[in-house]
Amino acid sequence: GVSLPASSVAVDDEVVFDPTLLGALGDCFNQGEDALVAVECAASHDYQLVLADGRFEASTAAPYPSEEEWLLWEDQFCVPALESFAGLPLVDDVDFTTFRPTAESWTEGDRAVWCAAYRGDAQWSGSLAD
């Protein structure tokens, strides 16, 4: 998936993502002007949270993970989370993105990672769990 740093400016240089404001597994949200905005899943939306507050297990002294290490983490945690949540294998039109600690927040002990599903450039309504 495409990966976006959690606590800094992200998608299209205008979206700031604060997963702690979004809440729980299954929540849906849209890409707004300057933030990601929670919406009802019945409405059209861009993303759905399939893994909330996952952890990248590493000591406080550990260096910031490489892109390869992030991809391994995604394969190990996001893909099964998405398949478990949706109740079906990862399909071609569904992908996921991760929201991860920034290099700066990592040094402060931030290890939270969030996985959100999306469908290309298109919005959809309903939940992947339906």
Image: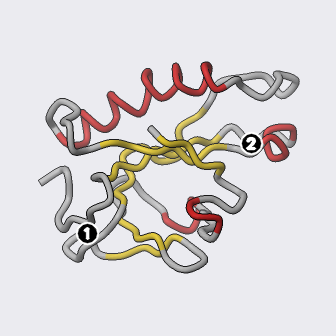
Q: Is residue 51 above or below residue 18?
A: above
Q: Is residue 93 above or below residue 71?
A: below
The tally of labels here is 2
Question: The disc labelled 2 sits on which kind of residue?
Answer: Asp
Residue at screen point 24% across, 73% down? 44
The earlier-in-sequence mark between 1 and 2 is 1
Residue denoted by label 2:
110
Residue denoted by label 1:
41
Secondary-structure class at tag 2: loop
In the picture provided, is 111 more to the left or to the right than 122?
Answer: right
Quadrant in the picture for residue 61: top right
Residue 62: x, y in percent? 82, 22
Q: Quadrant of the N terminus?
A: top left
In the picture provided, is 21 more to the left or to the right than 124?
Answer: right
Quadrant in the picture for residue 14: bottom right
Residue 31: x, y in percent? 46, 70
